[in-house]
Amino acid sequence: MAKEIKKTDKPQPMMPLGKLNFILMAACMLLIIIGLCLMGGSANEGETFNYDIFSSTRTTVGPMLALLGFVLIAPAILYRKK
C-alpha cells in the first residue's frame, strides 16, 4: 500500500492591502504628481516680470489637485472589501 501524504491545512497569510488598495493609491499618487507639475514653471528672469506666476493654474488648480490626492490617499489605504 502506498503511503498517503497528509496535507496540513494551514491558513494562508492575508495581505493587509489588496489589489484595489494599490490601484487607488496609484491614482492618488498620480493626482499628486499632476498637481505638483501644474504648480511648476519658470520664475521671474532678470528685468522682465513674468505674469505667468500668478496664473490660476499655478495658484489654484495645481494645489487643489495635490491636496485632493493627499486627502484621498487615506481612504484608499483604509478601504476594505466587504
Image (cartoon, grey):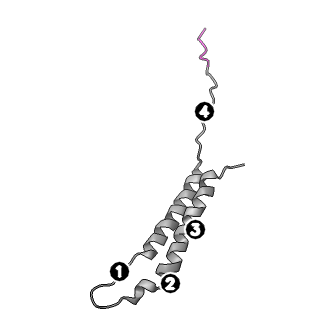
Distance in Å between CA atoms under marks 4 and 2: 52 Å
Q: Is residue 2 magenta?
A: yes
Residue 44 falls in image quadrant: bottom left
CA separation, marks 2 and 1?
15 Å
The image position of residue 2, as x and y in percent, is 59, 11
Q: Determine the image quadrant of residue 14.
A: top right
Q: Amino acid at mark 3?
A: Leu
Residue nearer the viewer, 55 or 7: 55
Q: Position of residue 46 (x, y in %)?
A: 27, 87
Q: Amino acid at mark 1?
A: Ser
Residue type at mark 4: give it. Answer: Gln
Give the residue drawn at x 43%, y 72%: 37
Q: Earlier in the sequence, mark 3 or mark 4?
A: 4
**Residue 11, percent across and down?**
63, 30
Residue marked by disc 2 = 56
Q: Is residue 2 left or right of residue 62?
A: right
**Which SS class for mark 3?**
helix
Q: According to the image, label 4 marks what residue?
A: 12
Q: Give whichever of discs 4 and 1 has the lower sequence position.
A: 4
Q: Residue furthest right?
A: 82
Badge 2, how many Cα within 10 Å: few under 14, some, many 20+? Answer: few
Q: Residue beneath label 3, please?
A: 68
